[in-house]
Image (tube, rainbow, N blue to C red):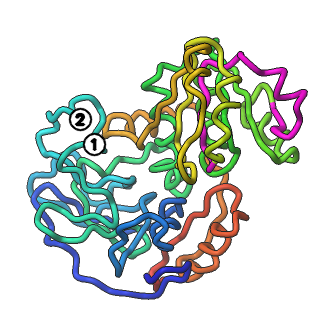
Amino acid sequence: MEPGIKVEPWSYTPRPLGEHDVEIKIEYSGICGSDMHTIKQEWSGTSYPAIVGHEIVGKVITKGEKVVHLEEGDLVGVGAQVYGCLQGDCNACSRDLDPHCPDSVFTYNNKYPDGHQAHGGYAEAVRVNSNYAFKIPAGIDPIYAAPLMCAGVTVFAPMLRKGVKKGDRVGIVGIGGLGHLAIQYASALGAEVVAFSHSPNKREECMKLGATTFVDVSNKDEIDAVRHSLNYLFITSDSQANQYNDYITWMTFEGQIILLSLPKGQMSFSPREFIIGEVAITGSLIGGVNVLKKTLEFSAEHNILPIIERFPMDKINDALERVNDGKARYRAVLENSPSSNL
């Protein structure tokens, strides 16, 4: 893949199958915003040629000799991480923060300890450490499971860590690929959900997804009505760096603003607002092994599913263009077939 949004067919020899690894025949691969940033080299350090995609669902076709929890034929999902310390007892993994493991390898544009390049899900198959291949619950249609492997865990992980619960008032900024799932998870946790969007035509849909209140951010009266009322605010869209002073005024005392998307440029806000409001701003990076398992279990239990658009793998460039133009509602998923070619 060269910078731009068009991808081309490419073949590679995978790293040798390790004793703790599995090879997965890919059936579905979701398109994530991180894929787009990497393809277009908007984040520094893209190593070409690159195969992106970290919302993977498929069946195990080969496994290493020490893999005991998975069998050939198992339907599994893979998210944004494919390797970590094998003991799982480092300072990060022992706290369910596996992405911060010193041995962590992300699904693409990263290298394994042996120097082999990691490649992602826009492909026929992938090899990963078996600890990062998760059985898909029977209650989830596999194509809908794909976006849960990144988008789902990205929004649910901080809700678990922060302890979002019944009676909390939770705001969601940006009703798109992340936000429409965040509404569902927060609602299922029992929270009162306030959806913030600049698109008034999303009001009805947000309410159906579980929001109790919809706020058109261009409507001052609607904004004023929710000031100083939120316990948590999850930022799921690329907000402007200068919007955070306003966000702080939406929070109740000791409220927390959690960034799930990277704003462009440097963030700008007044320290005075933090002190007066006793508000905290923090971030969250996907989720560890245990958190991803809980995400899938919780999604199956509460019937939390992404809204998707389906594309055959040979129409991948059409799908990428639609995502790049902001037209996808709300996650695009690529479908492999025996004759699919990238």
Amino acid type, residue under disc 1 in the picture: His
Residue 336 visible in the picture: yes
Q: Secondary structure at mark 1?
A: helix
Residue 43's image quarter?
Answer: bottom left
**The magenta stretch spans which residues?**
214-238
* Left-right relation of 202 to 1: right
Mark 2 near mark 1, Cβ–Cβ under 8 Å? yes
Is residue 70 one of those drawn in magenta? no
- Compared with residue 252, is residue 271 higher up or lower down, i.e. above or below? below
Residue 193: x, y in percent? 70, 26
Disc 2: CA contacts within 10 A as few (<14), some (14-19) or many (>=20)? some
Residue 143's image quarter?
Answer: bottom right
Q: Secondary structure at mark 2?
A: loop
Q: Nearer the viewer, residue 169 or 57?
A: 169
Residue drawn at the location 62% of the way across and 21% of the way down = 273
* Left-right relation of 338 to 186: left
Cα gap from disc 2 to disc 1, whole angstroms: 6 Å
Q: Nearer the viewer, residue 167 or 293?
A: 167
Residue 268: x, y in percent? 58, 39
Residue 338: x, y in percent? 45, 81
Q: Nearer the viewer, residue 27 or 193?
A: 193
Residue 272's image quarter?
Answer: top right
The disc at residue 92 is 2
The disc at residue 100 is 1
Q: Can you say which quadrant of the picture contains the N terminus?
A: bottom left
Is residue 219 one of those drawn in magenta? yes
- Compared with residue 147, is residue 252 higher up or lower down, i.e. above or below? above
* Left-right relation of 103 to 313: left
Amino acid type, residue under disc 2 in the picture: Ala
Residue drawn at the location 29% of the way across and 32% of the way down = 96
Disc 1: CA contacts within 10 A as few (<14), some (14-19) or many (>=20)? some
* Left-right relation of 146 to 199: left
